[in-house]
């Protein structure tokens, strides 16, 4: 069965802390997406990756294909980073379909 | 570009009524997706189109749901008749060609069925 698991479900951090959110999946993939859902509900694509590592500002996404695992890191976290972060996977052979993790609610306190 | 446009942003209706949600994808994108988000089930793919043709509708919950894409710039998701369990946020997303293109999401339509 094609599954995507995220951890933790909830995460509270102090401003400035280094944040890590994890995503694991069950079978081979063609791509993995990290999405951010703002408190107002809008969804933004942060990263799409199939191997290695990508960086954008204070956000870093890594993927280990052999271990079927990805991490999203936030350096020097800020209250404006508070959002739900969602991992979504395109499983191999599933064309464009995304299977979503349950999301991680991140709260960064000032 | 204005991004993916959805209307209405909020819809409140009574059980049994027909509901039509609308989506305008980003110009030039040839993939369009409809998703539903609920507290219980999170985000789920309902259906997606490629070049206006439905490719996979296995996520459509039942015959009360239907989706069309009459042209490259417009799609509708219709629920008839609506039920309280259809209450959710419905997102439309679009992406370009190539297997690894990211998806751009619309702001969503929050549907409440009383």
Image: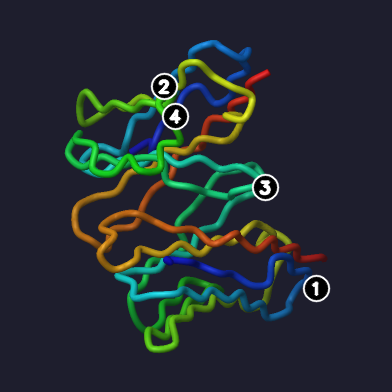
Res A14 label: 1
Q: Distance between the residues labelled 1 and 4?
A: 36 Å
Q: Do labels 1 and 4 share a chain?
A: no
Pointer 2 chain:
B
Residue A104 image position (x, y, % from top left): 65, 63
Q: For the residues carrying marks 1 and 2, which lies nearer the camera in this image?
A: 2
Report helix, strand or loop for mark 4: strand
Q: Earlier in the sequence, mark 4 or mark 2?
A: 4
Q: Is residue B30 left or right of residue B34?
A: left
**Vertical relation: B3 (above or below) B85:** below
Quadrant, the C terminus of chain A: bottom right
Pointer 1 chain:
A
* Disc 2 packing (10 Å; few <14; some 14–19; many ≥20): some
Q: Which of A16 and B13 is in front in this view?
A: B13
Identify the residue under disc 3: A39
Q: Do labels 4 and 3 share a chain?
A: no
At 68% from the left edge and 18% from the top edge, which residue is drawn?
A: B114
Report helix, strand or loop for mark 2: strand
Q: How far apart are marks 4 and 2 (CA)?
A: 13 Å
Pointer 3 chain:
A
Identify the residue under disc 4: B6
Identify the residue under disc 2: B78
Q: Is residue B59 left or right of residue A9?
A: left
At 24% from the left edge and 50% from the top edge, which residue is drawn?
A: B96
Residue B77 image position (x, y, % from top left): 40, 26
Q: How far apart are marks 1 and 2 (CA)?
A: 44 Å
């Amino acid at each position: 069965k094609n599954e995507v698991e995220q951890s933790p479900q909830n995460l509270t951090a102090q401003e400035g802390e280094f944040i890590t959110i994890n995503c694991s999946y069950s079978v081979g993939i063609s791509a993995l997406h990290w999405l951010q859902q703002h408190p107002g509900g809008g969804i933004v694509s942060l990263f799409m990756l199939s191997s290695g590592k990508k960086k954008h500002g204070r956000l870093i996404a890594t993927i280990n294909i052999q271990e079927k695992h990805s991490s999203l890191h936030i350096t020097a976290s800020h209250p404006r980073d508070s959002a739900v972060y969602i991992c979504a996977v395109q499983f191999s052979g599933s064309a464009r379909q995304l299977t979503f993790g349950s999301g991680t609610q991140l709260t960064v306190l000032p | 570009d204005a991004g993916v446009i959805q209307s209405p942003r909020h819809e409140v209706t009574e059980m049994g009524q027909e509901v039509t949600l609308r989506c305008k994808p980003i110009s030039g994108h040839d993939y369009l997706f409809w998703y539903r988000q609920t507290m219980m089930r999170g985000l789920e793919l309902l259906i997606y189109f490629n070049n206006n043709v439905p490719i996979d509708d296995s996520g459509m919950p039942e015959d009360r749901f239907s989706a069309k894409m009459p042209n490259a710039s417009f799609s509708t998701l219709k629920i008839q008749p609506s039920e309280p369990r259809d209450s959710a946020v419905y997102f439309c997303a679009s992406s370009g060609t190539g297997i690894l293109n990211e998806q751009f999401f619309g702001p969503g339509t929050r549907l409440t069925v009383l």
